[in-house]
Amino acid sequence: MKIFKYIFLLIVLAFFALSVFLATQKGDFNVQRSKVIKSPKATVFNYVNDFRNWENFGSWKIDDPKMQFIYPANTIGKGGSYSWKGTDGDGNVKTTDIKDNETITQKMNYSGSLSDVFWTFKDTVGGTKVTWRSKGTMNFGFKIYTVFKGGSDKVIGGMYERSLENLDKSLDYEMNTYNIKVNGLVKKLGTYYLQQRITSKIANVPKNIRIMLPKLIHFFSKNKIVMHGKPFVIYHTYDLAKGLTDMSVCVPVSQEIFTSPGSDITSGKLESFQAVKTTLTGDYSHSNAAWDKTFEYISKNNLVQNPGASVEMYSVNMVQEKHPSKWVTEIYIPAASRSVVPVKKIVLPVQNPVAVPPPTEKITEP
């Protein structure tokens, strides 16, 4: 009987010693992992910036298949968040700050273990270098877990390594899953529109559209004008030799609207025209191939490229859809039968288009 008492006493003493040992262990952690992701920086940033995508690449879902995710109305950008319930604990994370395409800062609470989380995105050879870092304080239970699993760096670092590997694979699929369909000759319907027109360096086109379009939307809001369709871009001229394009960023309206003299926002009308339409479903990086297939179709089908501006419409873009494989870009190149006297071929844009925010039925005051 005494032997059992001694054994019990030893167990109690061992447990007490272990508790003292664990209690005196450092509870702070600072873990960082990096990986080159084979995708453009903006694509990687936008994907990570939406918590709904974390379920696709986070290793914790594989480790705990029964984990449940709870998504609020806002999961993107500053103020975005999500939470989860898992076998090993519950938690939540919220984005507190972002710098577009550069950094994301977050606060995480995992069953009482609090941490600050930092993401950085840098262009590098082969893609984007993504660095994922967290620092914080572990609760007692998490300290016990990490001690028996080799330490916080191994536990958290291993999770980050597996997740970054999944992120690379997921984005690789999204970037390389695409389809190009030449729809053939169609009639592109005309519309009135309000525009901001500039001559831009081709390299600055994406940046300029991001500046110009919000200004147009604010103009619509201030003047209570209803949008009548999807925003689009008209390339009036596109000079590859000089690296310049004369372009208009346009928002369609149901009827002609006149603006004040001297305003840089003016009205215009896109006349109906016959065009070869091509639909690209997938990431915008495949737009060059879409333009090439359009020109090939014109050549093989006894058509000729007509004078006039080309139009690109972004039916489904990154603002509406998080998966690049589901983005839709419509390309319209003026063309007609060769019974029409051929004209000198116009150089049309083949650059990657940019994302345009989706239209709303009515613009209201902010």
Image (cartoon, rainbow, N blue to C red):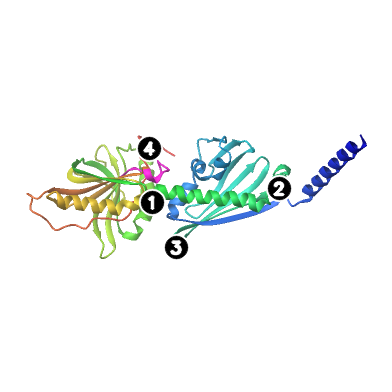
Which residue lies at the image location 15% right of the left edge and 51% below the top edge?
300
Mark 1 / mark 2, whichever is N-terminal: 2
**Badge number at residue 302:** none
Which residue lies at the image location 31% right of the left edge and 41% below the top edge?
230
Q: Residues within 10 Å of mark 4 (few under 14, many from 20)?
A: some
Res 325 → quadrant = top left
Tag 4: residue type? Ile
- Nearer mark to the viewer, of 3 and 2: 2
**Image coordinates for residue 125, horizontal then vertical, percent:** 44, 63
Q: Residues within 10 Å of mark 3 (few under 14, many from 20)?
A: few
Tag 2: residue type? Phe
Q: Is residue 270 above or below residue 206?
A: above
Which residue lies at the image location 20% right of the left edge and 52% below the top edge?
296
Mark 1 / mark 3, whichever is N-terminal: 3
Mark 3 / mark 4, whichever is N-terminal: 3
Q: CA distance from mark 1 to mark 2?
A: 51 Å
Which of the pair 146/362 is nearer the observer?
Answer: 146
Q: Are marks 1 and 3 in contact (CB under 8 Å)?
A: no
Q: Secondary structure at mark 2?
A: helix
Which part of the image, by quadrant, shows the N terminus?
A: top right
Residues rendered magenta in the picture: 313-325
Which residue lies under the disc numbered 3? 125
Which of the pair 59/249 is nearer the observer?
Answer: 59
Res 111 → quadrant = top right
Q: Residues within 10 Å of mark 1 (few under 14, many from 20)?
A: some
Which residue lies under the disc numbered 1? 210
Q: Secondary structure at mark 1?
A: helix
